[in-house]
Image: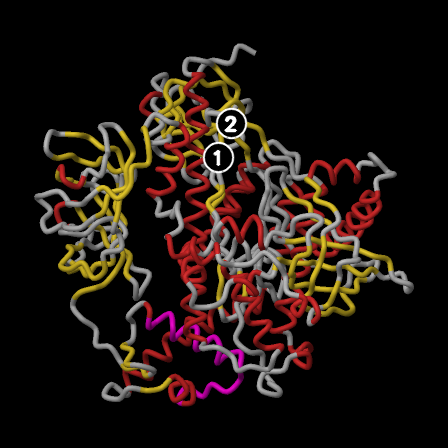
């Protein structure tokens, strides 16, 4: 698994180089993708799929010139194209789209570009002492920032909008005729209609009044919207959703596998409304188990090229903020029509597996079904059954049986190389008005693991059904296909070798060893380290460091396996209500089962890239919304002293997680005035030159909360003497 990942990674780099070399050698001709592949001697289907993935990515990054369905060599210009990433301190970086190179840019040289825009820059010559070459914007290629969320400041017959996103370095000017009812101090969304000069502000109009800036619910919504989360559905989408019937025609039931008599149940959080998966388990006469994972059949209701589908693709994912869910699909679909609510007939797409007591899937079928969930359980209710409570409840034996099998599957999965990083998530308890009352660590119950394990198994089975050679006889695409057809995989690459080497040095400070193989780490060795530190004081800081060293899981047409899970084939199938890639997977499975031709690889690859980017944006919005409430909570404790654990060291200070409050703050080195402190990067230690006092990750400390800034979402701390 590990070695194949590394080989595939190298293959992608080699393919990029070979494609560029081939087009450079034939500069005056535009070539179809098949001709290029033939010219490079690509014959096997796996390599061809990776080739198509790489070529589509190169076209999107403008590394090659695309003319219809043909590709041509693109002459290198003296200018470079990249994405502008601004820093709130007034400088930024431009990440080139055609390489890993990054350029430094000063605010006066940004021209009419805003944070996130695609820009063309002129690059300066590199001086010997420069870490990065400097650049200057010469053209905004694509205005990706078309609106801003911020605070409305009334100034007579005009107003300025102060952006919430501090990476937007200018206030937005709005004339009085475009106020749209906004009042001073309110949070608003404003368009970017004009920005002609760096010496003047961008101009726009108020698109929406979000609400009073001091309202805690408005704070969360405006934060999410400032990170490009779409709060409302367009009118055509809502109208289209309202026309969808909740009734299931008898003809649709007749053509499906009827599983309404099965003991199917759902297990979800207590506040969930979008139930997109359900399970059942039965003991067979041969002592194996029949396990069904039943997933809402969203693809039956959401057809391609409709207003709902286009909006769902644009969003790509539901966003789970600290105080609300912003769904990918309109409420009628996500919470009613598609949701697998108890005691209602529902259309599902099911993975039906025969599993041995040892956890091996020996047979399976993927079928369109009609189901009727018998019970809606919360994780806490399911855990009560697992712990032996209410044994006479009809659902108790089903949950207990499912949990026993899930534990067996988990043990086998971990033995085969999966890494269990555990969970370090927190939950902010809010009152009715949205003010934080408490912060608690989320419990990862056996009931959570039960559902996770069955979903992993279904996702893995679906991916293997398409991608694994020994499953090809189950497919019918245009009669028969010797090679796997295009599909969407959930992939997780091997970690960056440089980051892993840094991690190895980091854990050595704590007395642990992380073996490296060919400069990187196998998932077996990393999993062994994570298991070894469980329960140790340094567990969380090492786990966080390991997660930072990991590659990011994403969606791709070219399969490279999943490093963290230890799977050669993995996809996302089980959550089509809240993830668009799952919806695509459902459509592909049905398409291939009916014997239709595969879709275009380039379109699938572009959708993978978009969905991966939207997933990252959603995760950032979710994290920042939690951080906002954490800072709000800590404001009530300014001046109080708490015990904490050093969670990180940088040259500008020491990060400390407060044990009781479960929040992280920073002790600035400028405020550590009892000595002159020096940061030792080799040992990750902050050490006083005169006293020898030192701080390193994992140390227990006492700190005072001296500040909590909601706008920047930062908490300031000071070290205090621990009397104990």
What type of secondary structure mainly makes up the magenta span?
A: helix
Image coordinates of residue 680 in percent, x first then y, are: 40, 35
Residue drawn where x is 25% and y is 51% of the image: 146
Say whether residue 19 is left or right of residue 308: left
Q: Residues within 10 Å of mark 2 (few under 14, many from 20)?
A: some
Q: Residues within 10 Å of mark 1 (few under 14, many from 20)?
A: some
Image coordinates of residue 595 in percent, x first then y, are: 59, 82
Q: Which mark is residue 430?
A: 2
Along the line of sight, which residue is nearer the eye, 490 or 134?
Answer: 490
Magenta range: 39-59
Q: Specify how the rendered protein is coloured.
A: secondary structure
Q: Which mark is residue 323?
A: 1
Q: Residue furthest top?
A: 723
Image coordinates of residue 517 in percent, x first then y, are: 57, 60
Per the image, label 2 sits on a secondary structure element best described as: strand
Say whether residue 711 is left or right of residue 376: left
Residue 612 seen in the figure = no
Per the image, label 1 sits on a secondary structure element best described as: loop
Badge 2 or badge 1: first in the primary sequence: 1
Along the line of sight, which residue is nearer the eye, 672 or 718?
Answer: 718
- Image quadrant in which the C terminus is located: top right
Along the line of sight, which residue is nearer the eye, 45 or 342?
Answer: 342
Image coordinates of residue 205 in percent, x first then y, are: 19, 44
Q: Are marks 2 and 1 in contact (CB under 8 Å)?
A: yes
Rendered position, 29 above or below 119: below
Say whether residue 469 is left or right of residue 156: right
CA separation in Å, label 2 and label 1 = 8 Å
- Image quadrant in which the N terminus is located: bottom right
Residue 62 seen in the figure = yes
Q: Is residue 106 magenta?
A: no
């Amino acid at each position: 698994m590990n070695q194949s990942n590394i080989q595939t990674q190298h293959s992608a780099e080699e393919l990029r180089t070979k494609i560029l070399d081939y087009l450079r050698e034939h500069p005056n001709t535009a070539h179809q993708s098949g001709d290029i592949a033939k010219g490079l001697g690509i014959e096997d289907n796996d390599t061809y799929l990776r080739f198509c993935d790489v070529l589509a990515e190169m076209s999107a990054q403008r590394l090659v010139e695309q003319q219809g369905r043909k590709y041509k060599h693109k002459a290198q210009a003296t200018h470079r194209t990249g994405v502008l990433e601004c820093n709130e301190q007034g400088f930024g970086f431009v990440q080139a789209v055609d390489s890993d190179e990054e350029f430094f840019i000063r605010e006066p040289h940004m021209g009419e570009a805003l944070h996130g825009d695609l820009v063309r820059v002129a690059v300066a010559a590199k001086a010997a002492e420069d870490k990065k070459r400097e650049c200057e914007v010469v053209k905004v290629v694509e205005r990706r920032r078309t609106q801003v969320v911020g605070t409305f400041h009334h100034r007579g017959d005009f107003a300025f909008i102060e952006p919430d996103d501090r990476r937007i370095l200018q206030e937005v000017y709005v004339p009085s005729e475009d106020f749209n009812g906004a009042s001073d101090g309110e949070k608003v969304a404003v368009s970017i209609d004009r920005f002609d000069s760096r010496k003047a502000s961008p101009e726009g109009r108020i698109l929406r009044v979000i609400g009073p800036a001091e309202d805690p619910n408005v704070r969360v919504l405006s934060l999410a919207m400032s990170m490009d989360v779409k709060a409302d559905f367009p009118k055509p989408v809502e109208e289209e959703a309202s026309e969808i019937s909740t009734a299931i025609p008898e003809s649709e039931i007749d053509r499906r596998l009827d599983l309404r008599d099965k003991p199917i149940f759902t297990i979800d959080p207590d506040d969930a409304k979008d139930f997109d998966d359900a399970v059942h388990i039965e003991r067979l006469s041969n002592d194996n188990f029949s396990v069904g994972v039943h997933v809402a059949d969203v693809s039956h209701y959401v057809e391609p090229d409709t207003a709902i589908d286009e909006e769902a693709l644009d969003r790509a994912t539901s966003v789970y903020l600290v105080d609300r869910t912003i769904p990918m699909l309109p409420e009628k679909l996500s919470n009613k029509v598609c949701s697998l609510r108890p005691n209602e007939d529902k259309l599902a797409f099911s993975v039906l597996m025969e599993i041995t007591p040892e956890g091996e899937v020996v047979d399976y079928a993927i079928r369109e079904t009609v189901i009727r969930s018998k019970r809606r359980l919360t994780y806490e209710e399911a855990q009560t059954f697992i712990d032996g409570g209410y044994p006479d409840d009809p659902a108790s034996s089903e949950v207990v049986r499912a949990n026993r099998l899930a534990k067996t599957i988990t043990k086998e999965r971990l033995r085969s190389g999966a890494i269990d990083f555990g969970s370090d998530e927190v939950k902010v308890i809010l009152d009715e008005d949205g003010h934080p009352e408490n912060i608690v660590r989320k419990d990862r119950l056996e009931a959570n693991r039960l559902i996770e394990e069955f979903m992993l198994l279904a996702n893995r089975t679906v991916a293997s059904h398409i991608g694994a050679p020994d499953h090809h006889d189950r497919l019918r695409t245009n009669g028969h296909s010797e090679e796997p057809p295009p599909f969407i995989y959930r992939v997780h690459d091997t970690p960056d070798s440089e980051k892993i080497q840094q991690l190895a040095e980091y854990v050595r400070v704590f007395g642990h060893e992380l073996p490296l193989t060919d400069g990187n780490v196998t998932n077996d060795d990393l999993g062994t380290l994570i298991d070894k530190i469980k329960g140790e004081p340094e567990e969380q800081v090492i786990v966080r460091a390991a997660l930072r060293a990991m590659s990011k899981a994403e969606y791709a047409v070219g399969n490279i396996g999943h490093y963290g899970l230890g799977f050669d084939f993995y996809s996302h199938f089980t959550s089509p209500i809240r993830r668009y890639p799952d919806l695509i997977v459902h459509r592909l499975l049905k398409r291939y089962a009916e014997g239709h031709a595969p879709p275009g690889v380039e379109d699938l690859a572009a959708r993978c890239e978009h969905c991966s980017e939207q997933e990252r944006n959603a995760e950032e919005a979710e994290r920042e919304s939690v951080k906002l409430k954490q800072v709000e909570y800590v404001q009530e404790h300014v001046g109080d002293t708490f015990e904490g654990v050093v969670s990180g060291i940088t040259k500008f200070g020491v990060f400390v997680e407060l044990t009781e409050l479960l929040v992280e703050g920073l002790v600035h080195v400028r405020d550590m005035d009892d000595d002159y402190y020096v940061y030792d990067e080799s040992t990750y230690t902050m050490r006083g030159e005169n006293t020898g006092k030192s701080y390193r990750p994992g140390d227990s400390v006492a700190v005072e909360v001296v500040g909590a800034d909601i706008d920047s979402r930062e908490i300031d701390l000071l070290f205090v003497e621990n009397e104990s």
